Structures are given as C-alpha cells and as structure tokens.
Amino acid sequence: MKKFVFALASAGAAGAALAQSSVTLFGVVDAAVSYTRGSGDGSAHKTQLTNSGNMFSRIGFRGTEDLGGGLSAGFWLEAGLQNDNGTGFPSNTNNQTSGNGTPGVLSFNRRSTVSLSGPFGEFRLGRDYVPAFWNTAIFDPFGTGGGIGANQIYFSGLGGLPAPTGTRASNSVGYFLPGNLGGFYGQAMYAMGENDSNSVLPGTLRSNRRDGSHVGFRFGYLQGGFNIALATGKTRYASGDLRVTNLGASYTFGPSLMSLKLTGELYTESKGSTDGKGALIGFQLPVGPGEIKGSYARYRLEPAGAPMKPTTSKFAIGYVHNLSKRTALYATFARIGNRNGAAQALAGAITMPNRASTGTEFGMRHIF
C-alpha cells in the first residue's frame, strides 16, 4: 500500500495552520483459471480466466483530514476491476434497473463517499454498502468474491448481486455508531431513488416516485472471539418492495483449537409475491502460512401459489496459501445441487433442472 502524505502549511495573511491531510492509493488484483461444468442433456462446461476468485479486484483512493477537536473529514473512491480483460464495472445512479450503467465501463461503483467522523460516530454521504450486505460478506468464509466458492445466497437470491440495492445504494445518507460502546456496533442508512413527484410506471398512471428509496439498519455485538449481528433493509418499488433480513454470527476459538473460526448466517427475503429463505454454515482454519476454509449453504425460492419451491444447495472448500502479507495463491472446489426444478450452475456452466454443477479454480491475489 503506497501512501502519499501532503503536509499543508499555514495559509492566508493571518497565518492560520491547516491540519495534516493524507491520501492513500490502494487496491486488489486477483485472477484465476476456473473449470466449471453442468450435467444432464443440454448441459455445458467452460474453461476460463476469471477475476476476483479470492477477493474482488479493485482500485481506489481514500483520505482523511484531522479537523481538530476529535473531528475528521474523509473521502473514499473505489472502482471494481475485471483485470482478466482490462475492463471495469458500471455503477447505478438511482437504485433502480433504469439506472444501470454501460457494462464494462470503469466507475467508482464499489464506494463513493465523503464523511465526517467524531466522538458521535460517523456520517457518510454517497454510494455505499447497504447494512444487510455486511452480514453476508463478513460471516461467509468465502466472502462475496466472484469465485466458485462465493456465497450462494448472495449470487442467486432475490436481494443479492442481481438487485440494484443488493450490495450498495446510491444517493445515500449513512450513520455509524462510535467504536467505544463496549462491543456494540451499528449503522443506519437512508437512500433516495430521486424520482420526481410526477413519475409513473412506463405506459401506466401508477406512481413510482418512491422507487429506489432504501432504508436499512444493522446492529451487532463483538467481544473476544464472538461476533453477532442482525441486519434488515427495504427498497421501495411500485412493482413490489424488496425486503432483506439476515442474522450472522461467528466464534473464533483460542490457540488450543488452532484458532478455528466457525461462522453462520440465516437469511430471509421477499420481492413482491415471491419469498426466499437461506442458511449457511462455514469454517476457517489457519494452517501454517495459509488457511483452509469451507462452507455449506442452502437456498429456497417460494413463489406465491407455485406447486414447487426451487431449492439449491452448495458445498465449497478451498485453501489459501500466503506467500507474503500481500500475495497469495489459492485453490477451490465447489458443487451446486438442485431440486424442485432449480437449475443453478457455477459461473460459465449450464446445468439442467434438478441436476448438479461442479467446478475447480486456481488463482493468485495481490493486495497493494
């Protein structure tokens, strides 16, 4: 990580001294070779060079300024990268599908905020993570990286990656509790869709002026090796609101049990008349210079009035070998099973309903 520190001298005839400010350039470059396959007549397999198998590739700038009196100002600009082909990711301007940008463009889609911090906590303005996303990212051993081991609930659910506010919200005002509350932490967010008061659904007279407005909360407790958090969020849409609630927990044992970390998440969501439910358990086990991690997740869609409830389950196990503090090699194996008409497949593969999809992945990650 390379830091550029600028010392700001006295300014103006009065000679008033300005506080020191710092700017940091940071990022991740992650690439992997993966092979995924489906099963059944009409299935397909694929070998590809992918990005973000262990951590999402990114480049960003962040900085802080000490304002004195315990106050500080900051900014954070972070863009997602597809380093396997040199392109980026679009952002979303209004928390609705109409605000999706052009695929492949480089934008500060991951985070774009300005903030004010102090003894009261932190206020953030801009594009930022929604509260419910944090539990999925923190309590899954594979996080939400784009690899084959990544969270099944997040990638296939109603309120995960496919949703405009499944990960982040634009036009948001966020508040984070201060870090001196005896282990308790929390945040709240309100984001605006920014439709005008006369806005209606295309071809109708039905108002959608509230579409894209999001409200979310997260509260947790962290003490010693124990961490637990409850999060919820709601995004308004005239076609049916999106609601997500999840509970995540983890416990890290002491050295006598090799610092084994157990994790879990319970997940419920709805979009219009369709519900979804999921659960995940996992572990992380340090081994020498590396780490073994594994997870099992199950997700079920519950469309209103449907005779069947499509259900998927995913098992993943992987190993990360740290060559240094910044560079690592990794390998992952994953399998998705389908029931009740589900046909989920690992990225790149096509599988038939009620059949399985498997894959392997070998990659390298560098943090700067």
Image (cartoon, rainbow, N blue to C red):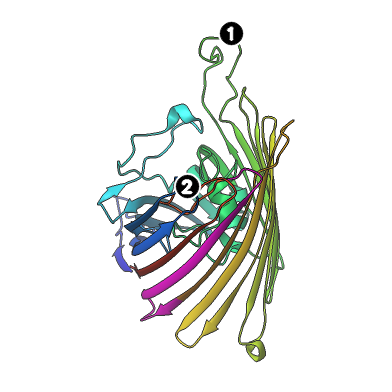
Residue 72 is a magenta residue: no
Residue 157: x %, y % from top left: 59, 45
Q: Is residue 251 above or below residue 42?
A: below
Q: Nearer the viewer, residue 350 or 217?
A: 350
Looking at the picture, which amino acid does disc 1 mark?
A: Leu
Q: Is residue 307 above or below residue 322?
A: above
Residue for badge 2: 41
Residue 120: x %, y % from top left: 63, 54
Q: Residue 1's image quarter?
A: bottom left
Sequence-first tag of 1 and 2: 2
Q: Is residue 39 left or right of residue 322?
A: right
Count of marks overlaid on the render: 2
User: Mark 1 against mark 2, which lies toward the viewer?
Assistant: 2
| Residue at left offset 46%, top offset 60% | 148
Crowd class of label 2 (few under 14; some 14 to 19; many from 20; radius 10 Å)? few
Q: Nearer the viewer, residue 78 or 105?
A: 105
Q: Which mark is residue 332?
A: none
Q: Is residue 269 left or right of residue 335?
A: right
Residue 28: x %, y % from top left: 35, 63
Residue 324 seen from this side: yes
SS at circle 2: loop
Of all residues, the one furthest to the front in this rendering is 41
Magenta residues, start to end = 320-342
| Main SS category, magenta section | strand
SS at circle 1: loop
Residue 324 is a magenta residue: yes
Looking at the picture, which amino acid does disc 2 mark?
A: Asp
Q: Spatial distance from mark 1 to mark 2, Cα to Cα?
A: 46 Å
Rendered-image quadrant of the C terminus: bottom left
Q: Nearer the viewer, residue 73 or 292?
A: 292
| Residue at left offset 59%, top offset 63% | 140
Q: Which mark is residue 205?
A: 1
